[in-house]
Amino acid sequence: MSYQGHELSYGALNQRSNQLAQALMDNGAQRQDRVGIYMYKGLDLGVAIYGILKAGCIFVPLDPFMPADRLSFILEDCEIAHIISSDAFSDTLNSLGEKHDLNVYGIDVDSVHKTLSWSDIAQQSVRCPELPMIDLELGYIMYTSGSTGVPKGMMHTHSGSITYARWGAEHVGLKPKDRVASHAPLHFDLSIFDFFSTAQAGATVVLVPEAVTRFPASWTKTIESERITVVFTVPHTLMSMIEKGAVAQRDLSSLRWILYGGEPYPPGKLRQLMLTLEDVKVTNVYGPAEAPSCTCYDVPLPPDGSNEPIPIGVVSRNSTDIIVDDNDEDCGPGQEGELCIRSSTLMVGYWNRPDLNENAYLFRESFGPFPAVYYRTGDRVVRQVDGNLQFIGRIDRMVKVRGYRVELDEVESVLTGHPDVSEAAAFTVPDGSDSLKIIAAVTLAKGAVADTADVLRLARKKLPPYAVPENIELLTTLPHNSSGKINRKLLAEQWMADHQA
Amino acid sequence: MKSSIANIRQHILTDILNDPSLELVPEQDLLLSGMLDSVSVMRLISWLENEYQISVPAEDVLIEHFGSLNQIKQYLDTRLDG
């Protein structure tokens, strides 16, 4: 593992994660307890992942940029009592002291919680705990936006993650000499490839600091200086890299394979990427975080001037798919419908949410009493004549903003949570660089005095940064259509007309 | 024209973040605090180009130039002097 010139060998990682596992168990962490990882990218992040797994616990990535309220919700939702963190987060963790009683690992400063520093942990035995674990137990729970206003946690088994990791390592042909960038945040499912596919091959994972990911020219500098060979990221990162990454001044010849996912890549832009990085292979990886990397497509150079969307390909090994219509009947050839996936990378379900689990799956008769369980992706697709799946859109109001998954219903439910807001509508408009941005329109209750800054402040307090509307407009009324629903399409059109200039 | 931290600060709070009440001191890390994402960074740079009549080449859009108000001022001053 490598981070800004510091390195951790497999041997050191093994030893330090064994010690963390021992410390967790000493402090009462039980097998399958949920343990939070709340820190920026750094070598300790890798130690945290493996330390937690070796203690038989489940790691829960906590977005370091999420507001304290959301963090508090997740800690409570999956009953986190142990958290691996760093000094940078001690103030936030202290502010949660009234509600949460935590064991915090990896911090040196005074805290209202019980703490252990890394030097305390280094006193522990270097023996790996021996636990009778099986691969159907949970390895991680990843939280994502929920449409009802609270995040939901996807439960993933060791067996699912191993399938995913092996698929990644084999597809790309990872070798020990590879240097795989960890560009995506840990709470993104792409990180499972970064950490575990790399480990399958005995290769090096190069952790990219969060700040670097915001600066295309710093990112290309990192590729060059770290001799990155493989990266899995979102189209937004790659498009800004080509447009603003000063690629002409960089030697990017180490790169050999780019995987992307999260949202469609405009074909013209992808052509530009592939012409700029001539010898680099490109794979479009599809799969909601509930069923990561369930299909993929190795992209040939899109023809000049082509607007033909890039297919999401065919199912990966250990996955199968069906496309169903509104009545859950199989679609005929060429017919659009919802993609349902059966895969060993499939999550076990949403943590603590029987209501969601009831509707998340489609059951098909298999043999005897055992039904085949498919996950309903919510994605509309069509199977092309050549067998490749083509993504068409969503069946609900989930959107992708620069690769981040956002439920517009959640944004609205947060906004209407403001005491002065009467109605709220969230919608997306093009952001001018091939992705979308979120805009909201609200009306105020009679006599209310709130301004947009007040409403924005609440949004920042409740939502992850990427889900906070870029603009909130105060309107006197919102347009409704004949069925009484807010006409968000009209709002988006009006917004675009007003902001065309 | 001389660059001014107060001017840049006001632009970030009022025009990019739409909330003048937020706390922002010159040495604060604009990125790790989560204050600016990749899109806000680009908006900030195009505003700086306009405001100070300079052009910021892609090669200069690096963390070490835009990580805090102090760093932004430092970068602008080298550009405005030259």
Image (spheres, coloured by chain):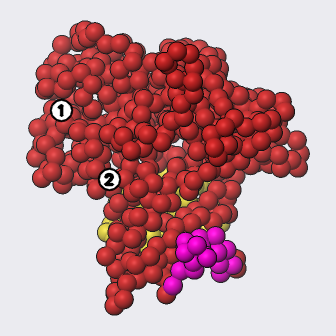
Chain colours: A red, B yellow
Name the residue carrying label 2: A70
**Please, what is the three-letter code of the amino acid marked with disc 1?**
Ser
Q: Nearer the viewer, mark 1 or mark 2?
A: 2
- The location of residue A128, given as percent across then percent down, is 26, 11
The circle on residue A117 is 1
Mark 2: give few (<14), some (14-19) or many (20+) Cα within 10 Å: some
Along the polypeptide, which appears first: circle 1 or circle 2?
Answer: 2
The residue shown at (61%, 51%) is: A395
**Please, what is the three-letter code of the amino acid marked with disc 2?**
Arg
The residue shown at (34%, 69%) is: A417
Image quadrant in which you'd find residue A420: bottom left
- The location of residue A92, given as percent across then percent down, is 23, 52
Dot 2 falls on which chain? A
Assign a secondary structure to mark 2: helix
User: Which region is colored magenta?
Assistant: A477-498
Dot 1 falls on which chain? A
Instruction: Indicate whether residue A322 is drawn in magenta.
Output: no
The answer to whether one can see residue A37 in this image is yes
Assign a secondary structure to mark 1: loop
- The location of residue A253, given as percent across then percent down, is 69, 30
- The location of residue A319, given as percent across then percent down, is 60, 23
